[in-house]
Amino acid sequence: MLSRHYHYRQRLKAKLESYRAGPCERCGSKRERRELAHAAPTPLSGRGRGLSQRYHDLRKHPLCYARLCLKCHGLVDARAAVFVRVEEPDWA
Ligand SMILES: [Zn+2]
């Protein structure tokens, strides 16, 4: 039997996937794989990245996250590019 916890996790996963489905917020790409990246540090940066922690951190600090494609995520992490938010994110 599937537990309630399982269903809860499935729901969070589906939500996160729907947020990740839009275009990259930096270059607009829908071809590269997109990820929800930290655009600014939150208390969750680094350790403690469990599914529900991640989800609640995203809802609590919506502007600290950015949907970036793999390419932009790499550039921003390497400080070779800067992410500037121009629109409210889907999850705000
Ligand atoms: Zn991109």
Image (spheres, grey):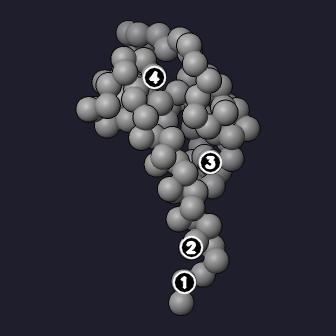
Closest to the camera, between mark 3 and mark 4, is 4
- Of residues 25 and 44, the one drawn nearer to the viewer in this rendering: 25
User: Circles 1 and 2: CB distance less than 8 Å?
Assistant: yes
**Amino acid type of disc 1?**
Leu
Q: Residues within 10 Å of mark 2 (few under 14, many from 20)?
A: few
Query: Marks 4 and 2, Cα distance to the nearest angstrom?
Result: 31 Å
Provide the residue designation for mark 3: 55
Q: Kindly state the secondary structure of the residue where label 1 is placed.
A: loop
Q: Cβ(mark 4) to ligand 1 < 8 Å?
A: yes
Q: Where residue 75 appears, x then y in whole percent?
A: 36, 17
Any mark on residue 25, and which?
4
Give the residue at x 26% y 32%. 31
Any mark on residue 6, and which?
2
Query: Is the residue 26 above or below the residue 13 in the image?
Result: above
Q: Quadrant of the C terminus?
A: top right
Closest to the camera, between mark 4 and mark 2, is 4
